[in-house]
Image: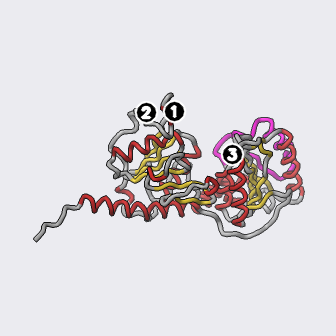
Amino acid sequence: MTENEAEPPKSLIPSPEKLSCWVLTNGMAGFETQGRGIAEALGLAPVMKRVSPSPPWKWMAPWGPAQPDGNIAPPWPDILIASGRQSIPYAQMIRRKSGWRTFTVVLQDPRIAPSNFDFVWAPAHDRLEGPNVLSTVVSPHRLTRARLADEAKLFAQQVTHLPRPRVAVLIGGTNSVYRLTEETAAGIARELAAIADAGAGLMVTPSRRTGERQTEILKEALKDRQAVIWDGSGPNPYFGFLGLADAVIVTCDSVNMVGEAAFTGKPVHVIELDSGQSRKEAKFRRFLDAIYATGAARPFAGRLESWVYEPLNATDEIAEAIASRFAAHRAKQAARTRPQEKKG
């Protein structure tokens, strides 16, 4: 199954093929993946909508009005899934202009009152509360058991020569909170080399944020060892390696990567990078402490460990909550439009 193919619809909501759904973002991959994952879990085929407001509308989001955009026009969808600060003014506008018919879902903290929308999901580490707010430790994504199996088949031939245990190594990089310096990369490379020397086979996927020099450090350390390192060409084996792995090692800089690893049910070892002392670090710390508490993940101590836990799956939990609230929303809409019975 390719990145753009949806799974067969589920029946969380009646007649999903008759419903229209938009996923509205600023085009960032993380936002789109979460929105598409929720839509697919509901059994919907979403239309992807992207907005890119210019100043001053960009500066005023999420509080200000939506900049006119010919791409955001009626007929309004039955369900709107919006994510990211720039999408919030449009979500409010669509809800209002549809006469509150469009069921409006916001993923991530909207930075304004959740009561402006029908449903809000936010990660637990954001500490957002409200009667229409659902919080989970991990984020929604597009992974399913079937997709993991399909992706594993696509890349199985690339790793058949590797010994077991086979370890998926997911390397992120520097962001606004954490730093992956050359020195840190060298330390990670030494630990990975030691794991390979102890008999494990490594399946390594760097990211765009890893850095050219940091990636070379990893390749140099593992070049004569039982390891496969994605070179950035051809299809990304990220999900395939997760499906083929017996264990996972992942850097802490991406909530999504850690959460996707915890969906596999395989031991997740988290490499905690040095912090840049950002104010956002507290949120990451709360997330890491929370996922450690679930039993899905542990801090990486330079060696492989084995344990069992119930796989984490926020996508289905969020989709089920949306389906329940959407049913109530439709019932309320129907009651408002139902003709009053004639008296006497």
Residue 144 location (% of width, % of height) = 57, 60
Circle 2 or circle 3, nearest the eye: 3
Residue 198 location (% of width, % of height) = 89, 59
Q: Residue at x 62, y 59 (%)?
A: 148
In the image: residue 281, left or right of residue 7? right
Disc 2 secondary structure class: loop
Spatial distance from mark 2 to mark 3, Cα to Cα? 29 Å
Q: Which mark is residue 280?
A: 3
Task: For label 1, count other residues whose C-alpha is less than 10 Å away and answer few (under 14), some (14-19) or many (20+).
Answer: some
- Vertical placement of 2 versus 174: above or below? below
Q: Residue at x 74, y 53 (%)?
A: 250
Report the magenta residues as a range: 208-236
- Vertical placement of 292 versus 110: above or below? below
| Marks 1 and 2, the one that precedes in the sequence | 1
Spatial distance from mark 1 to mark 2, Cα to Cα? 8 Å
Q: Is residue 49 magenta?
A: no
> Which residue is more in the foreground, 5 or 318?
318
